[in-house]
Amino acid sequence: MVKLSRGRCRLRYLLARTKITQAELSRRTGYSKQQISNWVNNRELMSFEAAATLAYVLKCQIEELYELVINH
């Protein structure tokens, strides 16, 4: 059976691509700058609701927020 899991957060790359700062993302989403930093630096995994919010603001798919790891 194949199982997918979340790898590294790609938020750092998505912010660079969209030229949005962590502070601006914080302002647009209502999440604290510290929370955004925790996600960017892989200290915490974001919830589905947070991922959906960030994907909406960054105009990307939720799947783009994390690398996917395939476990066989």
Image: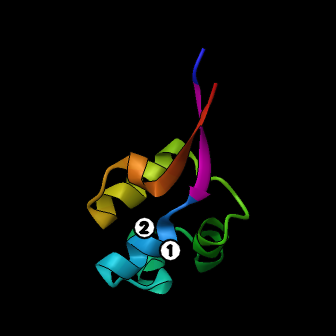
Residue 47 located left or right of residue 61: right
Q: Amino acid at mark 1?
A: Arg
Q: Is residue 44 visible?
A: yes
Find residue 12 and name its label. 1
Residue at 63% across / 69% down in the picture? 35
Secondary structure at badge 2 equals helix
Which mark is first along the chain, 1 or 2? Answer: 1
Q: Is residue 64 above or below residue 30?
A: above
Dot 1, how many residues are within 10 Å of its Cα: few (below 14), some (14-19), or many (20+)?
A: some
**Residue matched to label 2:** 29
Q: Is residue 50 visible?
A: no
Residue 2: x, y in percent?
57, 21
Quarter placement of the N terminus: top right
Considering depth in this image, is 37 or 27 the residue closer to the camera? 37
**Nearer the camera: disc 2 or disc 1:** 1
Q: Is residue 21 above or below residue 59?
A: below
Q: Amino acid at mark 2?
A: Thr
Residue 8: x, y in percent?
61, 58
Residue 72 located left or right of residue 49: right
Residue furthest out toward the front: 72
Residue 21: x, y in percent?
43, 85
Quarter placement of the C terminus: top right
